[in-house]
Image (spheres, rainbow, N blue to C red):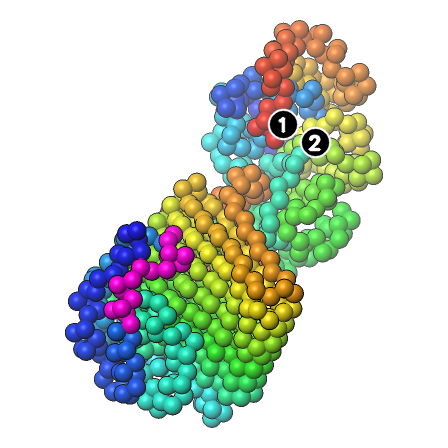
Amino acid sequence: MSTATSVSRTPPSFGEEALRAHPGRTGEPAWLGEQRDAAFASYQDLLSRPLDPEEWKRVDLRSFQPGKFRLADASSLSAQFQSLMDTRAEFAGIVSHVDGHRVESRLDPALAARGVLFGSLHELARSHGDLLKEKLFSAVRPDVDRMAAWHSAFLTGGTVLYVPRNVELKAPLYSLIGLDQAGAADFSHTLVILEEGAQATLLEETASTTSDRPGLHVGCVELLVGQGARLRYVQLQNWNQQTFHFAHQKGIVARDASLQWTVGGIGSRLSHVHQDVVLDGPGASGEVNGCTFATHRQLLSYYTQQTHRAVNTHSDLLYKDVLRDEARVVWRGMIRVDPGAQQTDGYQRNDSLLLSPEARADSIPGLEIEADDVRCTHGSTAGRVDEDQIFYLMCRGISRYEAMHMIVEGFFHSIYDRIAVDVVRETLSRSVERKLGIGL
Amino acid sequence: MSSVLKVENLCVSIDEKLILKGVDLEVRQGEIHALMGPNGSGKSTLAYALMGHPKYELVDGRISIDGESLNELEPDARARKGIFLAFQYPVTVPGVKVADFLRHAVTNVRNPNRKEGEGLIPMREFRAELKSRMEELGIEPEFARRYLNDGFSGGEKKRMEILQLAMLRPKFAILDETDSGLDSDAVRFVSEAISRLAGPDMAIIIITHHERLLEFNRPQHTHVLLAGRVVERGDARLAHELHDQGYTGVRQRHPEAAAEEQAAADAGNRQPAAAR
């Protein structure tokens, strides 16, 4: 089982020495440093054990050599990104990081005055230590698996959003996670805390400055949606195709709260995302939208869980994947219903569109239901682009390229229809268009 | 000056099997032609070959408009030159709205040199035009927002083909059994719609088994295909006669072609699968 153990030795760039010299340690509160050390111990322990085969067996990690990556000492402030979103909308606040270092952080002063926090984790850990100490790693425990432990030990910072009780943010917030230097590793964390009745939209994008410099992201997302709160969170993964992306992500949705979570998977050489949505209180609902487009030899893997812990909860997951060349997309989904979580409604669906015969999509839905009065359904389809469709469109004066684009856009349409944020729809559409241009 | 579509000695094969064996055809803008023949005689093959379907290999011959060869052109380039094929089996394209699709199509056909990514025709102008064409054809406005042919009934799909024809206004329209699978009201609707669209700027090549379409759109020229060759030519009377009497007479007058037809049928290939 080489695939499950290939990351089991610590390269010097992520050893004890490197942890001691971690640039993030400068000026960080003691509790965070202690958390690093404890996470490192967990990491060492977890390295000696195989990865969960249920989650990892379809992800071939042989091409991933952690020793080729290291933490960057500083970042270039002038890094230029192929960013898709930042110029396309009015944001109430922006936080950006490059190579694990903060380069920009701002928030509409009117929102700051109402108690909203939006900034870098590094700064907020100092200014709002009590809040972060309580919430950071409360959803994703550092010892839950190897990637989470690795992330916690080498945490490079990240973006924190806190919205107080009953505060509604109208304009979206934007977070950019960038990689610039060759071999740079980013261990950034996204923490969103919505108090009771709060509302916010956070758009996050990961991007590279170049198309050829290798990079590593070992990330973590925690979304804590308080009672009756509403969060829309979008993460568009748009790295270059030399970047490895690992992420452990979890949203916890309290009573009568709702979370709309949209994931775009466009970039990376290999990515594996563990995405959990936990419906933690009665009446909670979670909608998950996944939209991926893989080409060349990309491998994009998603391991999703929808956990219903309370009565009358609702979850709805839709992943749509487009694949071309020799790309591979793996989706392994699970709906869990705890005993007593009656009158729940869980749905999951994964559709794949294959643009070439060498592409491969694996779709494995699953249900684990321990309550008896529930409705849980799943479905998956995989199909090829029909040459008849292309011919038909070409007969109307539409070029092969445009026809292909139309068919792919049409395939994603049911996802776009669910995303109410124009900038997200446009961004996804544009990144699909840009990618379609490659090799055609 | 009116344009001429010229087909000379057209030989076309599908999967190495020769279907068209030297077809000649000359169609001038403004004319109506009927293309007739029994199943498997090559009518649909001719239609697809004119449009440039990749599965149809042009073994010999030439297709041209006003002397300019189309042989090497992709289907989209042919459409931009003014050829239109109304499909016998229109294709469903989920997620692509009729209006979006048509705006791209109309833009490309009217600006044949448009490069990818260049602007589309103005939305307001396009919408107004689409609205009035839809009204003329009795198509509900909500169809513009529906996905192309997705969940359409047989009759709705055929209407959609006619709407595309009305919007694109080609020089040469080929209607491949546009009346098949429709009830008599729908056939009447389609026939009337086509006769309204026909005019000096549009030639219509009608492939049909039915009389109705030709009643409303009286052909000046009828061509009869048998086993991949045009064996007879005439006017509207020939079409009428074939409709009344079938192809027995044609086969008797052309025993060699009839024998080839029989041989192909014996080989279990009465209707080439690729024609679908």
Which residues fall within the magenta stretch? A42-58
Q: Is disc 2 surrounded by few (<14), some (14 to 19) or many (20+) residues within 10 Å?
A: many
Identify the residue shown where x is 42% and y is 45%. A359
* Badge 2 or badge 1: first in the primary sequence: 1
Identify which residue, A69 or A424, lies in the foreground. A69
Measured Cα–Cα span from mark 2 to mark 1: 9 Å
The answer, for residue B70, to whether it is visible in the render is no
Image mark for residue B177: 2
* Residue A380 in picture, x, y percent from top left: 54, 51
Image mark for residue B44: 1
Q: In this view, does A282 lie above or below B1?
A: below
Q: Does the magenta stretch include residue A51?
A: yes
Q: Answer left or right for A425 relative to A213.
A: right
Q: Do the residues labelled 2 and 1 touch (CB within 8 Å)?
A: yes
Identify which residue, B166 or A7, lies in the foreground. A7
Identify which residue, B222 or B171, lies in the foreground. B222
Identify the residue shown where x is 58% and y is 14%. B267
Q: Is mark 1 on a helix, strand or loop?
A: helix
Return the chain for callout 2: B
Residue extending farthest right = B185
Q: Is disc 1 surrounded by few (<14), some (14 to 19) or many (20+) residues within 10 Å?
A: many
Q: Which amino acid does label 2 sit on?
A: Glu
